[in-house]
């Protein structure tokens, strides 16, 4: 059965607020769960390393993960890495170069009800994963879909240089809020496809939201 880390008491929460200078590795079926955004994992001084590496079927929930993009390029690989079957829910990831990256060949990852802010890439997907009701704000690339058959549903894309790009088809984009799209028309999403991802292609969010979704809260 899945193993869970103990829920931190108020005293233990102080440990979570200290700066962390090593990669946290979660073994398969492990849960790391905080008490909300007051539970802070601070990776500002981790340097050029991954912040959290999740094994298969892990859960990461109810906490804030803090990076520091001002230290780039030394912190260029700061990110949370998810493997197959992982769930990332009610997290705030702030100022990491790569917010959430899904490992090559990992599938069935659910990224739901999170806030991701400030960095280069918000979410990097491979194939067969779900990104639902997240706020993805102030990245160079909000989402990069490297694979196919991903579901990107009811997210807020706010202040990104490129909200979304892709390198394979098909992917499902539906009911997302795009801060720079004010038309009652399908929202085009530009990317590439083909064996070497060299063919320009367009996908659509056919039902773009008119107002941003209520997202996050840390619990």
Image (cartoon, grey):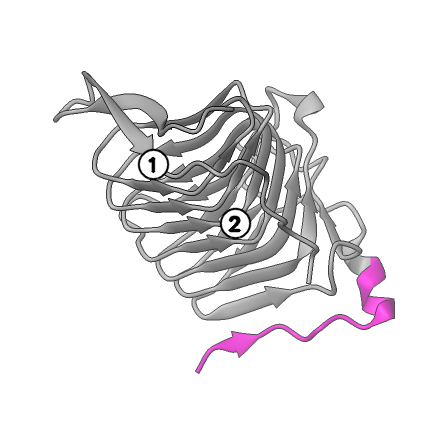
Residue 131 location (% of width, % of height):
43, 48
- Residue located beneath label 1 in the image: 206
- Residue 46 sits in which quadrant? top right
Residue furthest bottom as drawn: 1
Q: Is residue 124 above or below residue 10?
A: above
* Vertical arrangement, residue 51 with respect to residue 34, above or below: above
Classify the position of the N terminus by image quarter: bottom left
158 relative to 45 in the view: left or right = left
- Read off the residue under disc 2: 133
| In the rendered image, the vertical position of residue 168 relative to residue 152, given as above or below | above
Please name the residue shown 20% across and 22% down the image: 197
Please rate how many residues cluster around mark 1, counting C-alpha atoms within 10 Å: few if below 14, some from 14 to 19, many from 20. Answer: some
Q: Nearer the viewer, residue 118 or 51?
A: 118
The residue range painted magenta reads 1-14
Between 55 and 212, the one nearer to me in the picture: 212
State the residue at coordinates (69%, 23%): 71
Q: Residue at x 35, y 25 (%)?
A: 189
Q: Secondary structure at mark 2?
A: loop
Q: Any magenta on residue 4? A: yes
């Amino acid at each position: 059965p899945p193993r869970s880390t103990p829920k931190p008491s108020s005293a233990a929460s102080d440990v979570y607020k200290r700066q962390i200078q090593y990669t946290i590795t979660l073994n398969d079926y492990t849960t790391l769960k905080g008490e909300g955004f007051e539970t802070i994992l601070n990776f500002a001084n981790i340097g050029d390393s991954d912040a959290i590496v999740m094994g298969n079927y892990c859960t990461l929930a109810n906490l804030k993960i803090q990076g520091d993009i001002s230290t780039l390029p030394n912190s260029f690989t700061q990110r949370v890495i998810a493997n197959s079957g992982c769930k990332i829910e009610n997290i705030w990831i702030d100022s990491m170069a790569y917010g959430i990256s899904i490992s090559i060949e990992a599938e069935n990852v659910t990224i739901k009800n999170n806030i991701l802010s400030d960095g280069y890439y918000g979410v990097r997907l491979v194939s067969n994963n779900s990104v639902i009701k997240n706020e993805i704000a102030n990245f160079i690339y909000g989402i990069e879909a490297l694979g196919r058959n991903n579901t990107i549903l009811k997210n807020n894309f706010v202040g990104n240089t490129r909200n979304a790009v892709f390198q394979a088809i098909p992917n499902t984009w539906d009911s997302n809020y795009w801060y720079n799209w004010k038309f009652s028309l399908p929202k085009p999403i530009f990317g590439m496809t083909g064996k070497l991802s060299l063919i320009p292609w367009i996908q659509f969010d056919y039902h773009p939201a008119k107002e941003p979704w209520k997202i996050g809260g840390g619990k």
